Amino acid sequence: MKVTKDTTVTLDARKTVPVDVRTPRPAEQRGVLSYQTYREIDGHSLTQGTMYFDSAKRLYVSPTARVTEGTFEFTSRWQLVAPLLRAKVAGSNADLSAYYMPASPLFSDRGATLTAVDAGDAATADFSHARGRLAVVNDPTGAYEKDLVARAAAAGVRAVMLVHFGDSGWTRGDPQGERWAVPTVHIGSRAGADLLARIARRSTSVTFSGTARSPYLYDVMQVSAQRIPQHVVYTVSERNSAVVRSTYTDNGGAGWASEQRFGWRPYQNTAWLQCTRFVPTGFTRTEYVSDGDTTWQHLVHHTTTFDVDMPLAVGMRDTPRTYRAGAQPAETWQGAVVRPSIPIGTTTPTVREGNVLRLRIPEFTDSQSGHWSRAEQGDGGGIGVSGVNQAGDTTSAVLYRDGHKLIETDSAWTDMEVPADAARYRLELTTSRNLPDWKYGVATATTWSFASARTDTATPLPLLQFDYQVPVDAHNTLRAGRIHTIGVHVRAQDGLSAPRGVTIRVEASYDDGRTWRTAEVTDRGHNAFRARVAGPSQSAAVAWVTLRVTARDAAGNTVHQTVQRAYALQR
């Protein structure tokens, strides 16, 4: 549009069209819905975006003519899962648009059909005729909710439906924190008035269905290039998506994890308008992710965070990537063995440059190549840092030169200045996780020994790394038996040749390191080893396996790693 004089532009909402995202299975938008436009012309560009919370159900846009000068793009970002809650009057297709109250327990995945009873206004609610039924309560102020639900439960009410004072009954369910005594939902004032009028005329039942443990997720980036067409339709399938089988491992305490797969377009430097989601732990989900030139990065924190309206900032992360349509990768998050290592594909290698050791060793990596995290601070509202912090992670690092302590610090993610002459170095890194919701990998001790001298350019340090293959389930456990087998691969960090002449020793303990058993190790070639680990002598229901692994290569580089309670054996 060229503005050369006073100009009037008329926007007519009646001429907008819906953005129609179609999924293989029934799904609803959960969390933030966002859209944006990008315009580039005459060497200038502008990106504008808008976001809405779960209360937004539909998105309408104005079709445009094809842009012939410069670049234009319209994009909408969708996060779709199985419906959390559906409430319908039995015998009717009318959806009541019900929402869980944040502290409400959930109906079972089997659902429920309950006879509805008018229990009056919240201030004077009468539950005497609502035992075993659904109590519908007019809630003009929201001031009595917690006490009201407690009274309802004491009277034997099966569930409570609050009629909101506005047309929207939107509230957000939250899986964390204390639960009220019975399922409690909100509906809007119009739907509530219709329901109460129906109850007054005849016996009325309400059917509830839905699940918080959606077995599928659709991470969609819908893109319209150079125009917004008359029909904006995006049909999710393997022809435009990768299908990722993601397992969110239970680490022994938290029933829910925080996660987000951040997506951004080529003209963006980072993702925006995408906030935290929750997913059950000990759970595997099928996730469709849009293909093409959208960049994605997944973050997973082992427990819930306080502020879901902020982007997730802590937890395991993978390397930013695009996805190919039809690809079917598998991802496991927080899978054993969780320990310090330099992940494959890292963009921040550990190097020597001149007289400085630039150490970049994450405190935690998991069983999936490329996953890593720093020691975590707080509940996800800030960036993870090392040292003693609210999350209960404690870390420390000590560097020795020719047997003498040189530097002591709180992490191995730092720069250390050292003398120029060649010397033997020993780097010791310890971690401890002290919160009760982390029962695996609760403490680690890793020692690297290597030689180093001044370099003219940044040169990767020859720190040997362990990658473990332990066939645990989604709860980091193995079925107990006389013997179980694990894999250990020894490698150098990226940028160095594979180590030569590697020897390895694997030991296991079932009493947190007081006594040890040496495993039978088989060399499978290419620095991959298989260890046959004997089970505990006593038959406990659960046996915690502490691992101690040592490796050496022909150049004299060594690594010695102990992981306390790396995984468990269960009978």
Image (cartoon, rainbow, N blue to C red):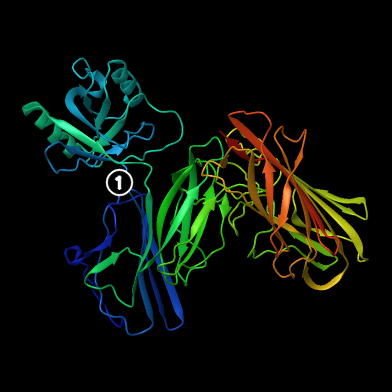
Question: In the image shown, does 249 or 427 lie closer to the viewer?
Answer: 249
| Residue at 52% over, 67% down | 269
Label 1 Cα neighbours within 10 Å, binned few <14 / some 14-19 / many ≥20: some
| Residue at 57% over, 52% down | 316
114 left or right of 528 in image: left
Q: Specify the amino acid type for callout 1.
A: Pro
Q: Which residue bears the numbered disc 1?
A: 83
Q: Quadrant of the N terminus?
A: bottom left
> Residue 153: x and y, percent?
31, 20
- The answer to whether residue 492 of the structure is visible from this angle is yes
Determine whether 134 is above or below 535 in the image. Answer: above
Quarter of the view holding residue 161 = top left
Q: Quadrant of the C terminus?
A: top right
279 left or right of 10 in image: right
Residue at the far left in the pictured view: 201
131 left or right of 365 in image: left
